[in-house]
Amino acid sequence: MKSLAAALTLVALSATQALAATPPYVTAALAAPGRPKADLDADALRDPDDTLAFVGVKPGMTVAELFPGGGYFTRPLSAIVGPKGHIIGIENAGWKGAVKADQAMIAEPGHTNVSLDVEPFGQMTLPGKVDVFWITQNYHDLKIAKFGIVDMAAFNAHVFQALKPGGVYFILDHEANPGTTLDEIATLHRVEKTVVIREVTAAGFVLVGEGKFLNRAGDDHSKPIFDPAIQGKTDQYALKFIKPRT
């Protein structure tokens, strides 16, 4: 059975290596007039077109987004899911300015389908099952003790329970060198892709795709992501997991 599961995973991964065509609703969401200049300026480095197309968010979906960070992805997600969909932002109550920035974004015109769940670090309360659980550049933060102690096995199990069968668990983060310790994660703000895959699949998820559109061979994985030499240009991986339907 394990061999069959591994073979199916390899087939699925092979089928998703190529970049998906950008759907018109993604293009329209990124071209919406309400996106701030700072977000538009960041697009060249963050590649939201390929990110959103890779995950497969569609109109009418419900998306839980961990740590919206003022809404860089929340805005286009809100536009994509539309009035029949919903975005639930899960924000850390302890990060200075984070909740205020999210609330300001929600108050902008057109974001009535966005709500905010403000919780202690690593906790969440969702009103129902979601189609997508979204984490960009923040999975590593869950391993930083100064923010709060998070049991990653329990966290990923919670995500598993929160998703509908067939739902997507999306994680994008900064690559780290093999053997990076928790203390080093706290300094570098990086986490190994292999560690993320091991932890998430242990919760019952199946890895079905890896997006390589933000892979950058020139990144020095020993440097913190905020080092001026690499900030905004780090080597990042995008992982798409699904909750099996049965």
Image (spheres, rainbow, N blue to C red):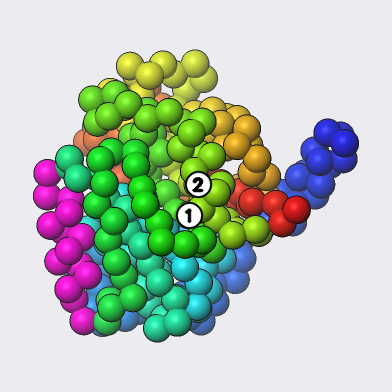
Mark 2–mark 1 CB contact (< 8 Å): yes
Where does residue 3 sit, x and y in percent of width and height? 86, 34
Where does residue 75 sit, x and y in percent of width and height? 31, 70
Q: Residue at (14%, 66%) from the top-left corner?
A: 104
- Total of numbered circles in the picture? 2
Dominant secondary structure, magenta: helix
Q: What stretch is highlighted in magenta?
A: 96-109
Please indicate whether residue 209 sits to the left or right of residue 11 in the image: left
Quadrant of res 181: top left
Quickly name the residue at label 2: 159
Where does residue 155 sit, x and y in percent of width and height? 46, 37
Q: Is residue 66 magenta?
A: no
* Spatial CA span between label 2 and label 1: 7 Å
The residue closer to the viewer here, 116 or 10, is 116
Quickly name the residue at label 1: 133
Looking at the rendered image, the disc whose residue lies closer to the viewer, 2 or 1, is 2
Q: Is residue 104 visible?
A: yes
The residue closer to the viewer here, 185 or 107, is 107
Where does residue 126 sit, x and y in percent of width and height? 40, 56
Q: Earlier in the sequence, mark 2 or mark 1?
A: 1
Q: Residue at (50%, 78%) from the top-left corner?
A: 59
Q: Can residue 54 be seen in this view?
A: no
Quadrant of res 228: top left
Q: Is residue 161 above or below residue 231?
A: below
Q: Residue at (49%, 43%) from the top-left corner?
A: 158
Question: Which amino acid, mark 2?
Answer: Val
* Secondary structure state at the residue bearing disc 2: helix
Question: Which amino acid, mark 1?
Answer: Phe
* Secondary structure state at the residue bearing disc 1: strand
Please indicate whether residue 112 sits to the left or right of residue 5 in the image: left
